[in-house]
Amino acid sequence: MSQTKTQFDAVVIGSGPGGEGAAMQLAKSGCSVVMIEKHSSIGGGCTHWGTIPSKALRHSVSRLIEYHSNPLFSNDRIQRGLTFAEILKHAQGVIRKQVNLRSSFYNRNGVTVIHGVASFESESCIKVVQDDGVEEYIETRQVVIASGSRPYHPEDVDFSHPRIYDSDTVLALEHEPRSIIIYGAGVVGCEYASIFRGLGVKVDLINTRDRLLSFLDAEISDALSYHLRNSGVVIRHNEEYESIEGTDDNVVMKTKSGKRIVADCLLFANGRSGNIEELQVDKVGLKPNYRGQLEVSKLYQTSTDNIYAVGDIIGYPSLASAAYDQGRICATAMLSGDCAQRLKSDIPTGIYTIPEISSVGKTEEELTEQRVPYEVGRAQFKHLARAQISNMAVGSLKILFHQETKEVLGIHCFGERAAEIIHIGQAIMEQKGEANTIEYFVSTTFNYPTMAEAYRVAALNGLNRLRG
């Protein structure tokens, strides 16, 4: 077995958003950087199994639903269905474009990319085993661990069964199911419930908690529950599995409450684990938690001074958008010992159900608990000309603001384009003093007709409540 030795200023392990952000920042600052990626293509879980493919799937299904609900194509004049395999082809095309784009970043910035499995030999030496068996030992001053996460696999569930999937393997779905059990009603579970229901598949969504996405504002969570149920999804709250058994024809799940649920296949989407095992971090004094995650400082430094970690491997917020920022902040701290920039406390949440959900800032429940005197301004999408034109009348925008100062405290949106709409409100919330008040949305002229006009409608509604 051949061996080689090289030396770099920094090693980044994992080419997802966090690793990419760190590698680009380090390289642009003049460091020699090597990116170690376990898989044959760069991009990490975000590009290959998570954000990009699932959102591409969601887009295709959303357009299919829009097509069927559009009065121009009603009365069965044109009926078109899509299989999961057909819409997956679109997702694979997007993945290829993303890989090519991200590969060009590494080429342009002079970052060396090595495909192989990385592990620590010491704090300053990384071993990489490539697919062809070649072992490379890399000497380095600093390391960034950005190895990401994978779907959690409980030991009593047989994921080798051809009808039992996780959120990675579902992208290679071999069936055209008429029914599916989705175990876990977090963000991933809710998104896939929307996707499969949009394809006409019967969905049982098993929630281990008492309501969907309990971190959301309750009104938005309730709206999602209503819309999923209205589309035909069966939601079962406060349920846990007793056993999951796959057969030649179906999957049978028995719950601890005594229910027996049968479907063509099952998607297990209940939690994730950090990709830590192969790194052998015990050799450098690091101890991951039970979820395989590492603890870091505000500058993403681990307890071993020259080793940093970003992205899913450190847990919350586990967002691709946040991971990229973490990588850039981490790289700056590696170079200068500090970084003035910090990850914003108000990170927008984007949930790509059908319709979308996005929120930033405080919820009504949080403000009530904190005894903050607030008021609410609402805009229903069905009253907006743009929503009527595009036949996207489901949804609303809600602005929470201080009754006395009129400061914007939280924004919550449910409906198509929510993840885009939210950024207008986020920009205003980031302003200081009088620039961050609900009156901004009244005094500003919005394009007409647009979905963004919902801010003006909601602001007027809220101010009228104050005067009322």
Image (cartoon, rainbow, N blue to C red):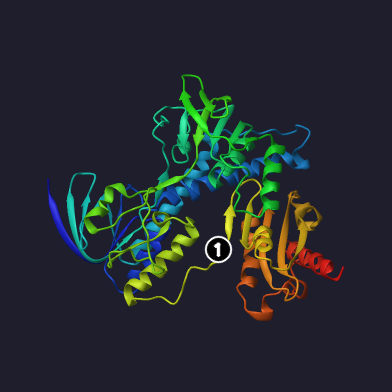
Residue in the picture at 59% in, 46% down: 59
Task: Name the image quarter holding residue 235.
Answer: top right
Instruction: Specify whether 446 is left or right of 291.
Output: right
Residue in the picture at 25% in, 51% down: 280
Residue in the picture at 47% in, 55% down: 318
Q: Amino acid at mark 1?
A: Ile
Q: Is residue 230 visible?
A: yes
Instruction: Specify whether 161 is left or right of 253.
Output: left
Q: Nearer the viewer, residue 417 or 344?
A: 344
Q: Is residue 110 above or below residue 431?
A: above
Q: Residue furthest right?
A: 468
Q: What residue does disc 1 label?
A: 347
* Badge 1: residue crowd in 10 Å (few <14, some 14–19, many ≥20): some
Q: Is residue 183 above or below residue 421?
A: above
Q: Nearer the viewer, residue 209 or 143?
A: 209
Residue 155 % position (x, y): 39, 34
Q: Is residue 26 above or below residue 53?
A: below
Residue 136 % position (x, y): 18, 54
Q: Nearer the viewer, residue 98 or 145?
A: 145
Q: Secondary structure at mark 1?
A: loop
**Position of the N terminus by quadrant:** top left
